[in-house]
Image (tube, rainbow, N blue to C red):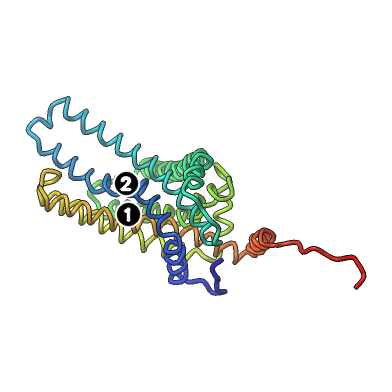
Amino acid sequence: MATIGHSPTLCGVLSETKLTIRANSRHFLALSILFLLPLSFASILYPSLITTLSTTNFITSHYHQNSRLLITLLYMLFVFLFSIFATASISYSTFHGFYNRSVSFISSIKSILFSIFPLLLTVLASQFILIFIFVIFGLLGALLYEGLLTFGVDVDYGSNYLLGFVICMTILILVVTIYMQVEWSLAYVVAVVESKWGFAPLKRSAYLINGMKWIALSIMLYYGILTGVLTISCSTLLVYLGGINGGWAAILEIVLCSVLLTMMMLSYVAAYTVLYIYCKVLHGEMAFDIADESAEDYVSLPVDDGKV
């Protein structure tokens, strides 16, 4: 088992993540090739494919519009399913790998079967809450607008005050969304490791993340910015090279960017699992895991009751 210090930092979490992945490099490589590499390919190819469809001479036709919509829906479904598969298998492997337990490829695949529905229900629960929050903000905006009309205030849609109000509301919604994502940053790990589902992982995550919110936010921003910049840069370069018909240069660019993006995704999912373990230490729950590990290693010795 890796040693966890009393003052966890972002660097500490990233370092433990790197060590855990390196200790089981072949195992994580297999999972990455199976689940993360297809996601990387899709993330890079999708913008280029949509751009290619948009520049065709028949894009105004009903057939091509339906094709673009179908590709978008298939892409979203593909990303959603493979994200769940990757989250389940990598979180399971990271958690057990951190404790130096032997994790087989088959057991990681089996973990998907046990985690897919808890993860799915947890995603639906989080989206329900976010939609409810957005509806509340929308209703407040509508009530404010109706109140101004009731008092006879003439609303100028080109006014800088209205623009400022819209900007402030947008920033407020963004801040609330980020805050909720930080609160729920461990929810998917909880769903996999503790087999909780629905609203329970969200509540559990909000409890565990207390005292570690800045680290969770730092992980989100660190990987979010890196993956975002890499994806946008690779997609833009691919379009510049001529898209999927760009020859060897485009193929090489797709391969290199996909490998880099896969490594980032792997580290991102594993980092939150390591953070989950740190949070359990902070809340004094690691003692139970240590006791379980010690019990597995305990060996009963024979006792000679005879006289010496």
Quadrant of image for the N terminus: bottom right
Q: Position of residue 279 (x, y in %)?
A: 56, 63
* Amino acid type for the residue under numbered disc 1: Thr
Q: Is residue 211 left or right of residue 175?
A: right
Q: Tell me, yes or no, whether the two marked residues, 2 and 1, touch with CB atoms within 8 Å.
A: yes
Mark nearer the N terminus (2 vs 1): 2
Identity of the residue drawn at 80% across and 63% down: 302
Q: Secondary structure at mark 1?
A: helix
147 or 33: nearer the viewer: 33
Q: Position of residue 154 (x, y in %)?
A: 29, 45
Residue at image mark 1: 262
Image vertical order of residue 127 relative to residue 64, above or below:
below
103 or 44: nearer the viewer: 103
Q: What is the crowding at mark 1: few (fewer than 14 residues within 10 Å), some, or many (at least 20)? A: many
Q: Is residue 67 left or right of residue 162?
A: left
Answer whether residue 272 is visible to the viewer in this image. Answer: yes
